[in-house]
Image (cartoon, rainbow, N blue to C red):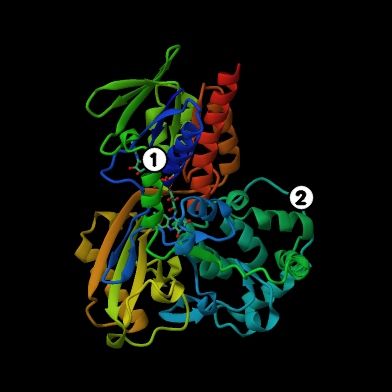
Amino acid sequence: MRIAIVGGGVAGLAAAYELEQARRKGVDADYELFESGARFGGVISSRVDGGTVIEHGPDSFLTEKPAAIALCHELGLTDSLIGSDDSQRKTFILVRNRLVALPDGLMFLVPTRLTPTLLTPLFDPFTKLRMGLEWFRRARPVQQDESVASLVRRHYGQVVVDRLADPLLSGIFGGDAEHLSAQSVLPAMVRLESEYGSLTRGMLAVRKKQRAQARTADASRKQRTIFTTLRGGLQQLIEALVAQIDPVRLHADTAVTSIALDAGGWHLRFTAGATERFDAVILATPAWVAAQLLHDVHGPLSQELASIHYSSSITVNLIYDESAIPALPPGFGFLVPAVERRAMLACTFVHRKFPGRTAPGKVILRCFAGGARGEHMLALGDETIAGLLREELRQILGIASEPLLAEVRRWPRSMAQYSVGHAERISRIRCHVDSLPNLHLAGNAYDGIGISDCIRLGLEAARALAQSETVRGNN
Ligand SMILES: Cc1cc2nc3c(=O)[nH]c(=O)nc-3n(C[C@H](O)[C@H](O)[C@H](O)COP(=O)(O)OP(=O)(O)OC[C@H]3O[C@@H](n4cnc5c(N)ncnc54)[C@H](O)[C@@H]3O)c2cc1C
């Protein structure tokens, strides 16, 4: 079976890796991967500068999502896996140019401890009263999808939307809490509401169950950290994947410009005008690219894909001599709510989050900009962007000195936005895809935005094709 993989980000590479494994086991999986850019890895890109790892895109994966770590083990990267230093895991929120620590006991957006919630300067007394009264809400059956902001507002009020939901979601999704879907982004909370009514009561019940389970689990099991990364940067994962894939099957600088389908199979057209025929296609591009490519194949599918919005992201890595800057607050970094009206969305103190990846005596700050509210910043020059963020760091952290290094990266239309109605849209997309022969979609637009989810979808697409080929071969 001839299989085309379009897109050489982590989803496409995971698919190619899996097909390579199948091929080595004798499955007729004759795959080719086409990547429009000069390099593989998509938004994953890192380099090491004088002993300091600089992550231009993502910096880690969530430990609780297993696909990325399992793949790293398979690729022989076990010794390079390191966890975040969770003893330093405090996050601050910028409130009128002051950094306020998130209160202890906050489980994502839900307060579960009374005293820290009462004492925090993050919320006003009326909001705190409202948060307390939330305890008495009655359960209600799952309703139509709504925005995260709407769900949080109903339970805790607008201040919690502005100071918590908005900055946390713009940190993870580069998105806007008023548009993101509660069902897709916070499914656990939608379930808690339908079961308990009160999110706080529900979360406490869940925590009690988790603690009981942890007590009965193997006590010697190592405590897992929240985030996991690779000692030499996430580029290590990309290099390890590429090393396992037959190089003649990897084509960089090769954009697919259109796709046609007829009784003879899938016909891919490339920038240079050439076409090639395949029996199957894995589209591992952003959904908006998949929409363009499938335009002439299936109009309704193309329209659904085009309706998945994307936000853009900008990262700015700044390296300083530790002795040249004031002491940083004790934590992983801070988030900036939209109501603060700043260019910066968030800042991570990278040397604290993953110690051991920064040269001694150096500090590395990773600032984020762009997102749903800062799309215009993409058009600015590197120096202007770095200058804007450095001025904000001066105001917020008192850092006036020149960085030793400043690196700006733009990731246009890279983060899929799971807007209200996302789950229904995805089931319609699945129906359309199933109506076409041997077509698979992988990437961050469908079933999880993180690296692990993208890997999982890439592997699943490859496995489905390898399996169908094995069945066909046996018949
Ligand atoms: C700044 C940033 C920080 C992030 N932080 C984290 C994090 O810390 N942890 C985490 O888990 N996730 C994080 N994410 C999300 C995660 O990194 C991405 O969702 C994931 O890496 C996407 O992988 P992908 O393969 O689906 O897409 P991409 O990486 O976007 O790859 C798609 C590829 O398709 C190629 N392509 C496009 N059009 C064509 C065409 N016509 N022909 C051929 N090729 C084409 C592109 O060039 C690209 O290489 C972050 C994302 C960004 C942008």
Q: Residue at x 58, y 28 (%)?
A: 431
Image position of 245 (left or right of 424)? left
Tell which tag, 1 or 2, sits nearer the viewer.
1
Q: Is residue 205 above or below residue 94?
A: above
Image position of 89 (left or right of 245)? right
Helix, strand or loop at mark 2: loop
Mark 2 — residue? 141
Mark 1 — residue? 245
Image position of 279 (left or right of 132)? left
- The answer to whether the residue labelled 1 contacts the one labelled 2, judged by CB atoms less than 8 Å apart, is no
- Image quarter in which the C terminus is found: top right
Q: Residue at x 75, y 67 (%)?
A: 201
Q: Residue at x 56, y 43 (%)?
A: 422
Count neighbours of disc 2 (C-alpha within 10 A) and say few if under 14, some if 14 to 19, many if 20 or more.
few
Residue type, label 1:
Ile
Helix, strand or loop at mark 1: loop
Q: For residue 318, which quarter of the picture?
A: bottom left
Count neighbours of disc 1 (C-alpha within 10 A) and say few if under 14, some if 14 to 19, many if 20 or more.
some
Q: Is residue 373 above or below residue 23?
A: below
Residue 427 in percent (x, y) is at: 60, 35
Residue 390 in percent (x, y) is at: 28, 74
Residue type, label 2:
Pro
Q: Residue at x 49, y 46 (%)?
A: 454
Note whether residue 418 is visible: no
Camera-nearest residue between 123 and 186: 186
